[in-house]
Image: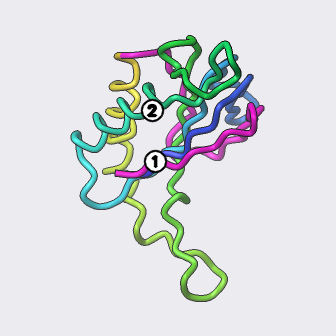
């Protein structure tokens, strides 16, 4: 399981000209799954995300988590996090978990995050337009 975390000032996701998720201050998560991912991975990475200290404290040091300073999460399914470009120029996505299995894990991950903070979502498998105002920019890759 891979989660690309971006600190955001404001972000939204649109599908077929309709906003399906929108946050102000918080985190945007691009989330991908592979073979062998399970509830243990989900719980570990959900806890890691909400405790990740990438928000500034009163001294301007990244020392606070989303739990400390508030905010929401915009979660976006992203199978391309498992792109393999080791052969040629066309990425292979063979390591990405298939839709029917990945959607359940994605839903479970978002449910787990909701135990901690408000979560907005994209639509799994849809053609999405994601607008991210990356704050910093701060981007961190998490993997389990």
- In the image, taking residue 24 as reference, residue 144 lies left or right, namely left
* On screen, residue 50 above or below 4: above
Mark 2–mark 1 distance (CA, rounded to whole Å): 8 Å
The mark nearer the N terminus, 2 or 1, is 2
- Circle 1 is placed at which residue position? 142
> Residue 42 lies in what quarter of the image?
top left
The part of the chain drawn in magenta is 116-144
> Residue 28 lies in what quarter of the image?
top right
Q: Residues within 10 Å of mark 1 (few under 14, many from 20)?
A: some
Q: Residue furthest bottom?
A: 88
Q: Which mark is residue 49?
A: 2
Residue visible at 33% across and 42% down?
A: 105
Q: Secondary structure at mark 2?
A: helix
Q: Secondary structure at mark 1?
A: strand
Residue visible at 47% across and 15% down?
A: 67
Pick whichever, 33 or 3, lies toward us: 3
* On screen, residue 69 above or below 74: above
- In the image, taking residue 13 as reference, residue 86 lies left or right, namely left
């Amino acid at each position: 399981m891979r989660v690309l975390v971006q600190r955001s000032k404001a972000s939204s996701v649109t599908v077929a000209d309709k906003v399906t998720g929108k946050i102000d201050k918080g985190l945007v998560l691009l989330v991908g799954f592979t073979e062998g991912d399970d509830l243990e991975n989900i719980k570990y990475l959900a806890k890691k995300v909400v405790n990740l200290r990438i928000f500034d404290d009163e001294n301007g040091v990244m020392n606070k988590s989303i739990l400390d300073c508030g905010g929401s999460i915009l979660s976006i399914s992203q199978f391309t996090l498992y792109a393999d470009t080791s052969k040629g120029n066309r990425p292979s996505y063979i390591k990405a978990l298939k839709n029917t299995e990945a959607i359940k894990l994605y839903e479970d991950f978002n449910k787990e995050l909701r135990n901690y903070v408000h979560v907005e979502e994209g639509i799994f498998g849809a053609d999405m337009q994601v607008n991210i105002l990356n704050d910093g920019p701060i981007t961190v890759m998490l993997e389990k």
